[in-house]
Image (tube, rainbow, N blue to C red):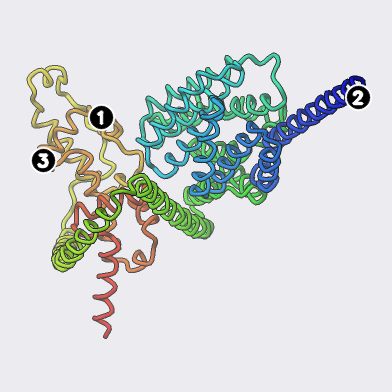
Amino acid sequence: MKKSLYLFLILFSFYTVSYSQATRETQINIINSYDRIEIDDQEIASMDKVKQLADQSKKIGFHQGVLRGLTMLQKIALMKNDYIESGKYSDEAEVLAEKLKNNSALSAIYLYRGKINIILDKLPEAEMLLNKSLKYAYKIDNQADKHIQLCRIYANFAGMYEGKGDSKNWYISTKKSLNAIETTPASNLTEYQKSKYYYLYIFELMNMGNYYGYAVNPPRPELAEPYFKKMMAFEKSAPDYFKILELEAYESMSSFYLVKGDYEQSIDYAQKLLIIEKTKSNYRERLMAYRNIKDAFRLLKNDVKENQYLRLYTALNDSIILSEKKAIVSQSRDEIKKAYVKNEQSKKTLLWISGIVITVIAFGSWLLVRRKNRTLRNNYQLMIERLKVESKEAEDAANITNDIEDNAPIEPDMTDESEASNKNLISAETEARILRKLAAFEKSEKFLRKDLTVGLLSSQFNTNSKYLAEIIKNNKSQNFSNYINNLRINYIVHKLYNEPKYREYKISYLAEECGYASPQVFVLAFKKINGVTPSYFIQSLQEDESLQYN
């Protein structure tokens, strides 16, 4: 009996050890499969494979494998611009990561959430999420993994500050990101870590080039070029790693040569990007390529090619904007749903109050709409009357010799600026000279430049920013920003009124035409100045034109 018991224990122990070894090998194979997908930059194409690996991990109770799969699916959905799906995977991954106390996964989860909010221009939320990601990154035990993750987070901070137009913090964050990757212990990196290391090294060289190429004013291409050259050197020295970032690298080179004035090179790199994008499907990079090509052809005076790529750019841009708006609405609905679940006990009260509020709002909205329509029509009529007066004045002015020339020679400013500053005075001669230059500037259409600042204009006028801002304030009764906005909006209003072809253009094109980088900013400025949106103004012009023909 004892011999039989011993034999059973021996066989059971052997089976247990064998099963444990087999399970361990399966877990290693799962992790290696995940690593290979990321190393080969095949996340999107391998989404089904990632799901299979996550399901397999769940079946054998391999929680770290399940977590890795969920964070990868969160990332893949983000890459596919499916922000709602990304959020669902994120929620599931967060619960498991907290249970396993996996700081690396938690840092990645918050990082991807931050990225989505940056894309959707929800920057306060993005900053909060990136700081959470940073907190968990500092707790990562593996030093190489820690440095790599810190580099990624600071790179996203830099992208966020770039979106804000905060060039100082853009530079600081980019330097922190580059420093993190440069100080990574690189002697014993795994193949997976190497793929991340080289990716980020190339990416941060690109960012430093972008900073000197576009963030500083004026651009410093001579400082940007060494970073771009070092980045492009990886195309030959580390081609396998470079391929992962080739879309972004080609877009940066195209934009750099556009700023530098080498338009043919800019087009060549943008065309390379479009060829690669066909296999990688990145709508935003394709949009940037269309933008650079159309701008390069515009500067080369090739109207046919410019219009061809303008149509491609406008169509794709409108599609992306629509997709992002849907994502914001869906995300908001999801947040409301969560709030209702947490407050189930007060649901009936909320519904009752909501019914009353909706009724009140509906009635109030009806009254407001009636008033708003009257106000909009009155504002439109005022615009038309003003345009008729201005058109008449322009005809009269055309018969009078204009004493102000756009290319008038720069007059030396004989005012002792330090003395004038101390007395808080601007000499009459200086003021008259600057007013003449402002008059010429208003006729030159130079106010359409997107990078125009009070510093740039004052340097062109051979004066200082303080003088120029003060004179604009005293003589135009507005600050510099409002002054430029009025010139730009007035320009596009006249184009819409006098040239019917402009009424067929998209809002995004009209915004670019009059110097705005963002259609949203353009619409807000238009409405603030005229009391109606550009869409309303265009629709009303078309309706009036239709009535005239009938």
Q: Which label number is shown at residue 163?
A: none
Q: Secondary structure at mark 3?
A: helix
User: Quick check: marks 2 and 1 in contact, CB under 8 Å?
Assistant: no
90 over 18 or under it: above or below: below
* Closer to us: 230 or 379: 379
Which residue is disc 3 drawn over?
475
**Circle 3 crowding by C-alpha within 10 Å: few under 14, some 14–19, many from 20:** few
**Amino acid at dot 1:** Asn
**Circle 2 crowding by C-alpha within 10 Å: few under 14, some 14–19, many from 20:** few
* Closer to us: 456 or 311: 311
**Amino acid at dot 3:** Asn
Q: Residue at x 55, y 47 (%)?
A: 289
**Circle 1 crowding by C-alpha within 10 Å: few under 14, some 14–19, many from 20:** few
Residue 211 shows in this picture: yes
Which residue is disc 1 drawn over?
462
**Amino acid at dot 2:** Ser
Query: Residue 360 sits in which quadrant?
Result: bottom left
The Cα atoms of the two marked residues, 3 and 1, are separated by 19 Å
In this rendering, position of residue 481 left or right of residue 30: left
Identify the mark nearer the N-term, 2 or 1. Answer: 2
161 over 267 or under it: above or below: above
Give the image location of residue 298, x and y in percent. 47, 51
